[in-house]
């Protein structure tokens, strides 16, 4: 690994620490989004009884198919 002066190494340590903090924040945000999505799909079932799935085709040349709920967008 590239090794600089004490000051440069200190700056690098601070930046690595910042990256670590951002990574924790990103993971926290992703968890919150997952929680919201779970809540949305649960509300859909509460409101409609079941997900109303319809078959969708992937928009790629060799894409397959999947089912998506018409009401909430939940995929399976
Ligand atoms: Zn749904």
Image (cartoon, grey):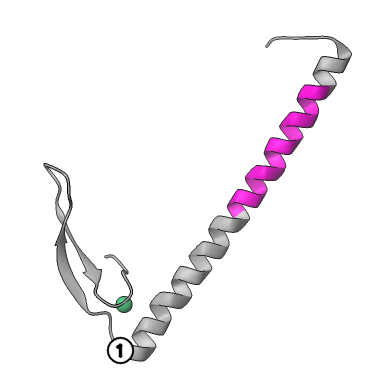
30 relative to 47, above or below: above
Which residues are drawn in magenta? Answer: 11-27
Within-10-Å neighbours for mark 1: few <14, some 14–19, many 20+: few
Figure quarter occupied by ligand 1: bottom left
Q: Quadrant location of the N terminus?
A: top right
Question: Residue placed farthest to the right in the image?
Answer: 6
Indicate left or right for 67 with 2 as reference: left
Query: Disc 1 beta carbon < 8 A from ligand 1?
Result: yes
Q: Residue at x 32, y 69 (%)?
A: 74
Q: Position of residue 9 (x, y in %)?
A: 81, 18
- Quarter residue 16 falls in: top right
Query: Who's the residue at 16% across and 44% down the image?
Result: 60
To which residue does mark 1 refer? 48
Callout 1: SS: helix
Q: Is residue 53 on the magenta stretch?
A: no
Is residue 61 shown left or right of residue 69? Answer: left
Where residue 62 sits in the image (x, y, percent)? 12, 42
What residue is rendered at 15% in x and 47% in y? 63
């Amino acid at each position: 690994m590239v090794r600089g002066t004490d000051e440069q190494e200190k700056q690098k340590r601070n930046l690595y620490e910042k990256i670590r903090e951002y990574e924790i924040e990103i993971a926290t945000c992703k968890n919150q989004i997952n929680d919201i999505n779970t809540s949305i799909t649960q509300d859909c079932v509460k409101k409609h009884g079941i997900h109303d799935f319809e078959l969708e085709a992937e928009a790629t040349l060799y894409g397959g198919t999947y089912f998506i709920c018409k009401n909430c967008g939940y995929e399976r």
